[in-house]
Amino acid sequence: MTGDEMRTRAEDTGPGGYAAARVRLLTEGARPGPARRAALAGLTDDWLAALFTGGAGRARGVSLVAVGGYGRGELSPRSDLDLLLLHDGSDAAAVAALADHLWYPVWDLGLALDHSVRTLAEARRTAGEDLKVQLGLLDARHLAGDPALTAALRTAVLADWRDQAPRRLPELRELCDERAERHGELRYLLEPDLKEARGGLRDATALRAVAASWLADAPREGLAEARRSLLDVRDALHLATGRATDRLALQEQDEVAAGLGLLDADTLLRQVYEAARVVSYAGDVTWREVGRVLRSRAVRPRLRAMLGGKPAAERSPLAEGVVEQDGEVVLARAARPERDPVLPLRAAAAAAQAGLPLSPHAVRRLATARPLPTPWPAEARELLVTLLGSGRPTVDVWEALEAEGLISRLLPDWERVRCRPQRNAVHVWTVDRHLIETAVRAAALTRHVGRPDLLLVAALLHDMGKGWPGDHSVAGEIIAKDVAARIGFDPADAAVLATLVRHHLLLVDTATRRDLDDPATVRSVAEAVGSQATLELLAALTEADALATGPAAWSAWRGSLVADLVRRVAALLAGDVPDEPAPAAPTAEQERLAVEAFRTGGPVLALRARTEPLPAEEPPGAPEPLGVELLIAVPDQAAVLPAVAGVLAVHRLTVRTAELRTLRLPEGVGDDEGDGAVLLLDWRVAAEYGSLPEATRLRADLVRALDGSLDIAGRLAERDAAYPRRRGPAAPPPRVGVAPAASHHATVIEVRAQDAPGLLHRIGTALEKAGVRVRSMHVSTLGANAVDAFYVTTGTGEPLPEADARTVARGLEEALRPG
């Protein structure tokens, strides 16, 4: 451009011309978006360049540089102009005069200005002392003057940043954490700060700085779109308020939504939350990668000196197809997501149980998995329950699955509640996060219920109706029935889930608003819940829901009222307590094994694998059991339960369900040799990972365990020492109690504990030491929770005295507590 053309442009873009052009652009131009921000930045560039040319005079070795947001070309209507007048120090007076010529017109127009005048050395020194200055200079962009000077600045600043990254990046992360502590999570706030809150524009800028360091990079999928969306909202907010504000206040949300062409304020907030979720997740992944790189750099020199090269990353198995590597959960090399539709849930459950993050690369691979059939196979349902019951780590794992759209694929109804705002001062979360938070709270209450799987799934579903018009409890009841059928619950369990969702507000509403001394009040609640088991679940769900809502939703007073109501309803429902379940008639195979065991005097077993076919081959609605069926028959003797459970633990077999009963052989079998009593164990087991052991090996070890030549405790201790288990989330402590009036023929010891290798062996050993006889047992593993009932008697076959029963329960609970 010639000097005459520049002077013409300067006249056109003088204070009056620039102001008029700026107003036209902001009031008559397109809606907020990248094009308008770029146009505003270009218009401002031309004006400032003209001012620079008109005031440069004799000044040489000077350049005008845009930094920060203006340097990125992202000018919102009320954005500050971040400017640096860079000079070589040869003529300080001329530079000062030029600065006055530049700054005063900006101030005269009422524009916010963040300015500085520095030499290259001063700029580098200031950046080294002030992280915020350094971040701004990373986006330096030449406007006018000596381009070589600006280029030298950019080169020097980037080189300094990369050299200092190991020291500065932890400082940057600390700034981000402090800002999040002050301003909260953007994606959950009703009046969020678009810039300062976690997941906002500041965090997006920090991710750019991390990428510029070359140490790590943020996941790029959707990040640019999320950042652009937040900038669009800020543009509309500036125009709606006429102020340089980043806080999206309630009273301005409708106008901002209209400025963006959105339906309403809820649609606006949901768009903001979606963008913030993407930025937050990218930040989590990026900072985790930064930490790993910095740790690796600190350790690598010593390892190289010791090993003479870079060691291979250790991979430890977590589940079938899932391993841990370098503090993350990744897929095994042999894993094939496209052939294994259950793998996403298996990886997610393993990660949550281990308290480890899912690798972004692994999540992207999991997104290629085939859809689950309908209904889900049993393994998938168990894994969902395990994921939901893992406590606080569930949140991060769920977010990782959300980032690749896996949750909506698993649960299509989730799409309606994802990032949905709740305009209620009591609620601190969006609907989707509230549901996950309720599951987290419910995980701590799983020892209080007999069906923790139903509690956890009800926690996930209880507010799903908020994505539909009308009463969300009524809509949620229909959704709960559909989801329960889809994920493979039988009709009876689906009905319980529907009842829990329909009445999840019943207890707290009744307890706080009705007269509990009125029999009609208690009767109405009893009629709604129907059974003591459902009441037990509803009480736990009520507490978890309230705790997950916010501090104002639960208190000691509310808790005491609900507990009082539950006691009254339970008393009304009492009296219909079933006795010990009558065992089913033995099958032909069970009788054959029992006879063979009695005649040989040793254990006999049958191990039958039941594999789940690929979805394409599966008949519609065909239920498939989890794992394999293991039938064991043993002549009646002491210590059978701990021996069998110990052998299974040694072979890394996880017990899903188990039943033990005494089978009396038909007359004519064993009359001359004894009473024909055989212990029959019908178990369902699954390999922890890898293939199943051979039946002959299992039987050989069982024979040794029963005769005392196999040291099960020692074998388990050696294995644990060689492969120490990771410290995952803290599980609720075990609860062992005596079920009152549960059986007329035996004492029922109820055990609710975290499932773990060798758990049933420890239970059996403790009961054996207590000197009681296990008449029958019913063991089930629901997700990561073991819910077991043991019908025990004295040596003479009588129920235990009440005091002895309590002593046995206390001793068993103590034996199950972590050491």
Image (cartoon, grey):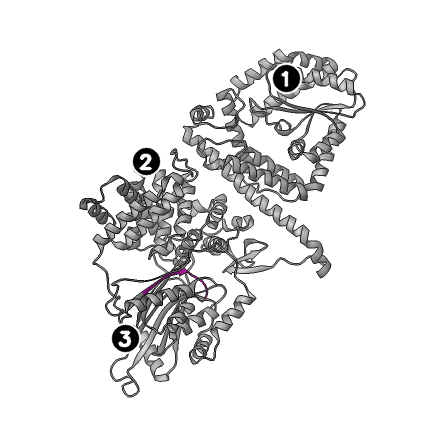
Three-letter amino acid code at the position of disc 2: Pro
Amino acid residing under circle 1: Val
**N-term mark: 1 or 2:** 1
> Gap in Å between the C-alphas at discs 3 and 2?
59 Å
Residue pictured at 38% horizontal, 36% vertical = 426
Disc number placed over residue 469 in the picture, else none: 2
Q: Quadrant of the N terminus?
A: top right
Tell me: residue 62, above or below residue 783: above
Q: Is residue 654 left or right of residue 334?
A: left
Residue 521 position in % (x across, y down): 21, 44
Crowding around mark 3 (Cα neighbors within 10 Å: few <14, some 14 to 19, many 20+) is some
Give the residue at mark 3.
797
Q: Which mark is residue 106?
A: 1
Q: Callout 1: 10 Å neighbours few (<14), some, many (20+)?
A: some
Name the image quarter holding residue 429: top left
Please, is residue 690 above or below residue 531 in the view?
Answer: below
Which stretch did the figure color magenta?
749-757
